[in-house]
Amino acid sequence: MSIFNLFGKSGNDLSGRLARTTTPLRSMGFISIDGKSYEAMSTQGFIPEGSLVKITGYSLGNLTVEAA
């Protein structure tokens, strides 16, 4: 299922939204948006579990995030 189908809009439309990591992001991991879990890729390397992140875009099938 594409990110378009999951959100009803493109991943790039989510840029600027805040989310919380539900696993450590060792480049890849999971974040929670509105109570749902999604795979995301950190553009800054390691981000610990429970951290607040900002969605920066969508690349290669994944949301991209950075520490907020």
Image: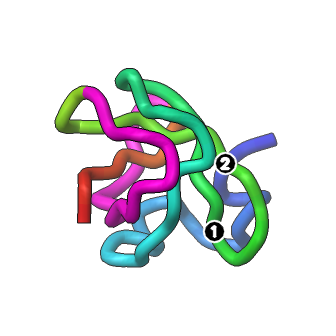
Query: If you read the primary sequence from the N terminus, does the residue marked by circle 2 or circle 1 appear first?
Result: 1
**Which residues make up the magenta segment?**
46-60
Residue shown at the point (34%, 56%) measured from the top left: 57
Image quarter for residue 5?
Answer: bottom right
Q: Amino acid at mark 1?
A: Ile
Residue 63's x, y, as percent? 47, 47
Left or right of residue 34: residue 43: left
Image quarter for residue 39?
Answer: top right
Residue 13 part of the magenta-drawn span = no
Q: Can you say which quadrant of the picture contains the N terminus?
A: top right
Residue nearest the viewer, comparing 48 with 53: 48
Residue 47 part of the magenta-drawn span = yes
Left or right of residue 16: residue 24: right
Give the SS element for disc 2. Answer: strand
- Secondary structure mostly taken by the magenta-highlighted segment of the chain: strand
Give the labeled residue for mark 2: 38
Residue 64's x, y, as percent? 37, 46
Residue 20's x, y, as percent? 51, 62
Give the SS element for disc 1. Answer: strand
Residue shown at the point (63%, 68%) measured from the top left: 33
Residue 27's x, y, as percent? 36, 24
Q: Which mark is residue 33?
A: 1
As drawn, the residue found furthest toward the left would be 44
